[in-house]
Amino acid sequence: MKLKFFGALVGAAMLALAAPAGAATVSGTNIVNALGTITPKAPATGFSPSDLTNGVDGINGADYTNGKHYFDYVFSFSLPVDANVKITGDQTAGTNVLDFHAALFSSSPVGTDLLVGSSPNKFISLTDTTNLLSEDETSGGTTYLTSLNIGPGTYYLRLFGTIAGSSANSVLTSLHGTVAATPVPASLLLLMTSLGAMGFMVWRRPVPAGNAAA
């Protein structure tokens, strides 16, 4: 029995050593860029880092595996009421953007790492998805993110990805997007509709013969 247990431990250790070299993590940003309150029906709120060139609002052009670079930015916003949220994100870099993610969280993701996939050119996810509400990924271009019916509170949008090449041009030259909110159907209206449907079903239910005779 002891030999079997020892053998299992050795096997697990060998599998860990044999894991793909790309399956690792890189450090995430510790900075949050506040966008303020997003009001339903108001025009979409545009956002971008205030100092993208120097990377002081996030991570821009940090060393990544296999000679690539990566970026990571977090923006916060508040909702005053229940709402549906639509987010866009766009980026350009001195060289090709290989991988671009947008992820929305219910609590701050700063300080959490990014998980590198088996492909050295891409992330596969985040190391901590406990408070992840939604995520979208694209190769370059624009990424679109929608979260339906989320309540009042503060939320955190994380934009991150990888950039080709290892030269001084392997940094973001622009990063911007929009956040827009639309109201959800009123809770009271939904409740009244449900109660009305239940009342109709009770009214339509046949009356037992004994009760009718009484």
Image (cartoon, rainbow, N blue to C red):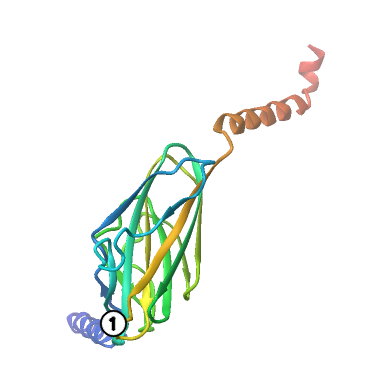
Residue at x 60%, y 33% (from the top left corner)? 190
Residue at x 39%, y 78% (from the top left corner)? 122
* Foreground residue among 149 and 91: 91
> What is the residue that sits farthest to the top in this orientation?
214
In this image, 135 relative to 19: left or right? right
> Residue 182: in sight, yes or no?
yes
Identify residue for label 1: 168
Total marks shown come to: 1
- Residue 79's place in the image compared with 122, above or below, is above
Residue at x 80%, y 21% (from the top left corner)? 209
Q: Position of residue 59 (x, y in %)?
A: 27, 68
Q: Quadrant location of residue 62?
A: bottom left
* Foreground residue among 208 and 188: 188
> Residue 19: in sight, yes or no?
no
Residue at x 40%, y 65% (from the top left corner)? 175
Q: Could you tell me which secondary element the residue under label 1 belongs to? A: loop
Q: Residues within 10 Å of mark 1 (few under 14, many from 20)?
A: few
Q: Position of residue 11 (x, y in %)?
A: 25, 85
Q: Position of residue 178 (x, y in %)?
A: 47, 55
Task: Identify the image quadrant of the C terminus.
Answer: top right
Q: Quadrant location of residue 55?
A: bottom left
In this image, 86 relative to 156: left or right? right
In this image, 148 relative to 94: left or right? right
- Residue 112's place in the image compared with 119, above or below, is above
- Residue 184's place in the image compared with 69, above or below, is above
Say which amino acid is labelled 1: Ala
Q: Quadrant location of residue 111?
A: bottom left
Q: Position of residue 106 (x, y in %)?
A: 37, 50
